[in-house]
Image (spheres, rainbow, N blue to C red):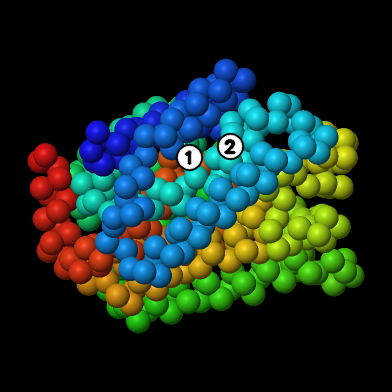
Amino acid sequence: MNSYIKSKKTIVLVMIASIAIGFFWGLYFQAPGVVKAIFSALMILSAFVFPYGYIRSNDFDKISNAILRIILALSVFSILRSVFNEDADMYAFGNKWTTLFGNEYCALLLLPPLFTYLATEPANILYAERINYQYMLIGAFFIFLFKFPLATIVLVLPVFVPYVKRSYKLLIGVAVLHTVLGATLGPNPTRANLLYLLFAVAAFFLVFVVRKKAVTKIFCISCVVLSFFFFVPLLYSNNHNEPSFFEKAQTYVIEKTENKDLATDTRTFLYREMALDLTKNDSWIWGKGAYAHYYSAWFGDRLNGRFGRIGSEVPFLNFLMHGGLVYVFFYFFLILYAIYKGLWKSNNRFVQCIAVVITGWFFCSFVCDLTGGRYYHMLLFMLLGCCLSERFLKMNDDEIAMLFYEGENI
């Protein structure tokens, strides 16, 4: 079986798995047991059929390959730590093995960076672009059920807008509608949806309308710096007499709008509780392993006793809990290096737009619920791979346009 066929099977399996659980139930823990089993089985199967030959043979530079291989090695190390961990709390959330390899927030959480290698062959990107059309077409029907499965994927859609047909652009418009409705309607409106949309619009506007690379660079650098400035200090801000940025913002919004729901701070306590737990368990450097949990006083008795929560809504905190500062460093270094390559080393707007999208992903990883391993994670890391691929970096705008044009006619 050649690499392209394996790549296609991987992409399809991840898409089907994501549809099975995301379009009907949304979050992993909300789905029935049989659906969780189907999702987990398909995701594990996608890892089995993955074309691992790309790890040895690709067109990434030495730094990219080194970072990716370190991330994969750390992922395996994290999983093995849980495999050989015989503590009683490893059975706090059910069977140890089904939780470790089946739960979306354990071993499967570490899977998405592997998909970066799929950018080695441009045909894989073109196939993912076509599969994405089917994914959005299916997701469009769920707008009538107040399910908004396309809200997250809207972040990566601007990279395709200039290269697809009118019907595809119409579905992208539906995805935007999903995003707005998901942020304002339904039983649990998600404010993060508007942040995804904001970065999507910024990516398209800066790269395809403004077309000033200097402005785009300033935007991306500012977002990265602000991410560290706003969020990382929360980890050591355990003195509740000193309000965090979010608590100050909460007070300001309430004073200006008198809207307590809009001003609700749902992130400061997540950072503080994770920091306290990691300190108590001496887990800052290497984390707790692929199967991990932390105690949350905020959620209290609703949880599994003293064992707490199996994951956090914030990806940065989730990776910190599972892999510690070591994993977090290399994971985000990969993202930052891709942004650098995409903006400073590329010859086309397709890759430059991806770099802005990745910047949005970087920022959202400190505040939004992007945890897990699903289709949109795979697509994001496939596109990230384009920023590392020498072939994509060297193409000019005409060559990129021709690539998508020819892909539509295959």
Frontmost residue, 215 versus 398: 398
User: Which quadrant: the N terminus?
Assistant: top left
Which amino acid is tagged 2? Glu
Q: For this view, does 391 lie left or right of residue 353?
A: left
Neighbours of disc 2 within 10 Å: few (<14), some (14-19), many (20+): many
Residue 390 showing in the rendered view: yes
Label 1 crowding class (10 Å Cα cut-off): few <14, some 14-19, many 20+?
A: many
Q: Marks 1 and 2: CB-CB under 8 Å?
A: yes
- In the shown orientation, is residue 21 left or right of residue 260? left
Disc 1 residue type (three-letter): Arg
The spot of residue 355 in percent (x, y) is 38, 65
The secondary structure type at the circle numbered 1 is loop
Q: Secondary structure at mark 2?
A: loop
In this figure, which residue is indicated by the disc labeled 2? Answer: 104
For marks 1 and 2, give the CA distance.
Answer: 9 Å
Residue 199 sits in which quadrant?
bottom left
Identify the residue at image location x=26%, y=41%.
Answer: 3
Q: What residue sits 32% from the left and 50% below the top?
A: 54
